[in-house]
Image (tube, rainbow, N blue to C red):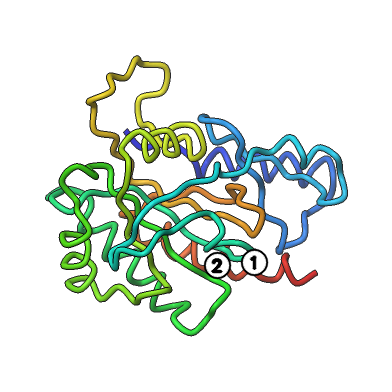
Amino acid sequence: MTRPVKWISAVALFLFACNHGTPEIEALPYYASADFTPHWIDKSSNEINSIPQIAPFVLLNQNGDTITEKNFAGKIYVADFIFTSCGGICPNMTSNMRKVQAAFKDDGEVLLLSHSVTPELDSIAVLKSYAARNEVIPGKWHVVTGEREMIYELARSSYFADEDLGLPREDNDILHTENFFLIDRQRRIRGVYNGVMPAEIAHLLEDIAALKKEAAL
């Protein structure tokens, strides 16, 4: 089930505008919990320190390179969670991620990160083949595998990427979400989008541009 992210954001933005005036177009909200309630915070406020960062990680990309949070230091990036044998939403998600790559192909400030949620099946060789089929640009888009425990801990604790809020999860359950996550230069979530909907991808592209402007201020 897809979370109703956009209508929540719209209502919150309306209420914020009524009480505080219309926010600058460059200012995107922050997301700090699994219900994806947007929070508009002044960058000079101490409240920003309460917004969690994506936790450190150590993974391997499609070329066998070690990838950590340091590869994304000072960068804006879009993250998702897929598996190469998925015949459902993953092909559409990857196709849309390819559109994001194309839009920022020559922009070194913007990177992409796709995590395999079946790392026991998605070896480096499998990911390399998958990346080739999907025109993944090395250095721009990292498709990663690694320890299952780390990937799932990242997904659930840092990205809140679990479709069944409040329901118990078994360790062997395959995590699957259609969400794309927009991460800022401080590794904080600034946007959540349905990765299979064209309108959401268009909105994501606009927000990446807005986040770049915000960072330049």
Q: Quadrant of residue 176?
A: top left
Q: Quadrant of the N terminus?
A: top left
> Against 89, is 211 above or below?
below
> Against 122, is 207 above or below?
below
Local SS, label 2 = helix
- Most foreground residue, 130 or 216: 130
Q: Quadrant of the C terminus?
A: bottom right
Q: Taking 163 as reference, is 26 left or right?
A: right
Q: Taking 87 as reference, is 64 left or right?
A: right
Taking the spot 81% from the left edge, 37% from the top edge, the residue there is 47
Cα distance between the residues tagged 1 and 2: 6 Å
* Identity, as a three-letter code, of the amino acid under mark 1: Ala
Q: Name the disc covering residue 206, or none.
A: 2
> Against 155, is 63 above or below?
below
Taking the spot 83% from the left edge, 50% from the top edge, the residue there is 21
Residues at circles 1 and 2 in contact by the CB criterion of under 8 Å: yes
* Identity, as a three-letter code, of the amino acid under mark 2: Glu
Taking the spot 51% from the left edge, 30% from the top edge, the residue there is 34
Position in image of residue 81 (x %, y %): 33, 47
Identity of the residue furthest to the bottom in this view: 106
Q: Taking 131 as reference, is 141 left or right?
A: right
Position in image of residue 193 (x %, y %): 45, 50
Local SS, label 1 = helix
Determine crowd level at label 2: few under 14, some 14-19, many 20+ residues with C-alpha closer than 10 A: few
> Against 149, is 129 above or below?
below
Q: Name the disc covering residue 210, or none.
A: 1
Taking the spot 73% from the left edge, 45% from the top edge, the residue there is 40
- Most foreground residue, 43 or 206: 43
- Most foreground residue, 217 or 115: 115
Q: Taking 6 as reference, is 197 left or right?
A: left
Q: Name the disc covering residue 79, or none.
A: none
